[in-house]
Amino acid sequence: MTSNILETPRKIKKLLVGTRGSLLAVTQTHLVMKMLQDANPGLEYEVRTIKTSGDEGIDILGAFVKEVELELKRGHIDLAIHSLKDMPTQLPSGVCIGAMPVRGEHRDCLVSRNKLKLNELPAGAKVGTSSLRRAYQLKLLRPDLEILPIHGNIITRMKKAEDGIVDAVVLAAAGLERVDMVHKITQVFTEEEMLPAVSQGILAVEVRDDDMETLAIVQKITDVRAEQAAAAERAFLSALGGGCRMPIGGYARMINNELVLDGIMFNEDGTIFETERLGSALNQGTELGTNLGNILLGRFGQKNN
């Protein structure tokens, strides 16, 4: 994220915006572009959908952003809108995060077939999730549950509960909020019950780092609190050497003029975990995340000796 304050160009060009073709991705793109139009009167844009490796079922870090970034670097689009949690902590050369708007709902939620909350599900109930982080935290709350891996977009996953393949699914509440499906939510988990994925609920506007005109346009909607939280959470993830699908959770927020970060880390099979809270000055998010990551790594090292 560049820290320069850039002047908005006198004549705003029409922006070509890249996104995945899923309902959530397209909806998020239009939400961000509406923010940009409000901040830059007269701005026009055109959305171009791009198929990614993640859409093809490839489950690797950055699978939902790689092809979009390539189109951005080639100059075929001017900017891209991503869920920040899908982005690797190290971006490829030539691109940068130009803005992060106000963070949406950061928590996870339960969607169940019979509107039963987690503690109301019958013994041995089947709960679907594609995330080890969610699966292991669910097991801490309800060791009796049968956790089943499920994949697909939010509609596909919710349908598995509706059709009785599973009794419930766990999803990011922000996604349902953005596609106007909050009524589907049975329960929103507190941070004490389930720490979210790093950067969950934060959207990122990615641009070429030499495109000063577009940078000037997008910087108008950046939110300092979202940036500070993202800096801490992504530094925490980076310190642990993890990707967005590792069993790691982290959430940073401002409490009494202090940046506070909670983190949790599981071993590969979920039998060992460590959690900790750390605070710092608001402008020291990167150091905060790195320090917390090193603390948890140190504890895991002691357990393995």
Image (tube, helix red, strand yellow):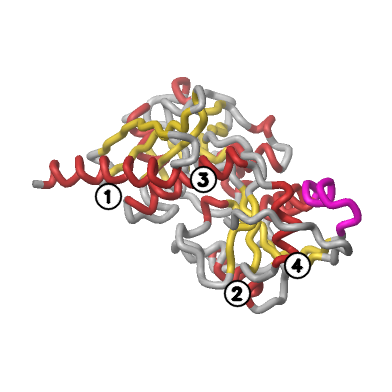
Specify whether residue 145 is in view: no
- Name which residue lies at 43% across and 37% down: 126
- Residue 80 on image: x %, y %: 67, 62
Query: Would residue 109 be found to the left or right of residue 99 on screen?
Result: left
Q: Amino acid at mark 4?
A: Arg
- Name which residue lies at 61% across and 41% down: 224
Foreground disc of the pair 2, 1: 2
Query: Would residue 38 be found to the left or right of residue 70 on screen?
Result: right
- CA gap between label 4 and label 3 equals 27 Å
Q: Secondary structure at mark 3?
A: helix
- Name which residue lies at 63% across and 48% down: 100
Front in this rendered view, residue 58 or 92: 92
Q: Earlier in the sequence, mark 2 or mark 1?
A: 2
Front in this rendered view, residue 107 or 170: 107
Q: Earlier in the sequence, mark 1 or mark 3?
A: 3
User: Callout 4: 10 Å neighbours few (<14), some, many (20+)?
Assistant: some
- CA gap between label 1 and label 3 equals 25 Å
Q: Which residue is mark 2?
A: 70
Range covered by the magenta-colored residues: 34-43
| Magenta segment includes 42 | yes
> Which image quadrant: the N terminus?
bottom right
Q: Amino acid at mark 1?
A: Glu
Q: Which residue is mark 1?
A: 268
Q: Which residue is mark 4?
A: 48
Q: Earlier in the sequence, mark 4 or mark 1?
A: 4
Front in this rendered view, residue 225 or 144: 225
